[in-house]
Amino acid sequence: MTKIKCFYISLLFLGIGIQQSYSQTYKFRTSGFSVLEKNEKGKWGKWSDLSLVNIMVSLDTDKNRLVVYSRNIQLYNILVYQPESESENDLVYSFTCKDNDGADCTVSIITRKKQENRKQLYITYSDHVIVYNIFSM
């Protein structure tokens, strides 16, 4: 009887280990951010000066969320994984999301091919855009 229990317990731990090994969590660090806003006439203004920040960003595809660990934690629930798009200059992964206030937005991770594969995280709302320069951890 104890051999059967040991077998099932071993099988359980093996199953949990395999499941966690396939977990898709990506961790990034930011090095700076900037904001772009629409003015009162609905036209896009200019990007703000780049502010240096060092915060963690986590993309967890198992939980369908992206979290920016700023002073006020920004949680984005991923509703739709948009098709990857690639051009001569950029590789773009985009997600249709709802933030922790329930507002709709698009989150994009862009790799700038002609800029030594520099990565940026864009969080786009109807009236403003936040961009973070990011690098993989």
Image (spheres, helix red, strand yellow):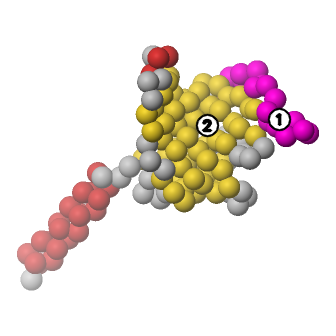
Asked where in the image residue 69 lies, by quadrant, the reply is top right
Please tell me whether the stretch drawn in magenta is mainly helix, strand or loop.
Answer: loop
Could you say which disc has been placed on residue 69 in the image? Answer: none
Residue 116 coordinates in the image, percent (x, y): 45, 16
**Apparent side of residue 3 relative to residue 13 in the rendered image (left or right):** left
Q: Name the residue under label 1.
A: 43
Q: Is label 2 in contact with label 1 (beta carbons under 8 Å)? A: no
**Relative vertical location of residue 114 with respect to residue 9 in this rendering, above or below:** above
**Apparent side of residue 40 relative to residue 101 in the rendered image (left or right):** right
Secondary structure of the residue carrying numbered label 1: loop
Q: Which residue is pictured at 8% across the width and 75% down the height?
A: 3
User: What is the quadrant of the N terminus in the image?
Assistant: bottom left
Q: Which residue is pictured at 54% across the width and 59% down the height?
A: 79
Q: Distance between the residues labelled 2 and 1?
A: 19 Å
Asked where in the image residue 26 lies, by quadrant, the reply is top left
Residue 22 coordinates in the image, percent (x, y): 30, 52
Secondary structure of the residue carrying numbered label 2: strand
> What segment is highlighted magenta in the picture?
37-53
Could you say which disc has been placed on residue 122 in the image? Answer: 2
Residue 115 coordinates in the image, percent (x, y): 49, 16
- Name the foreground residue: 98 vs 16: 98
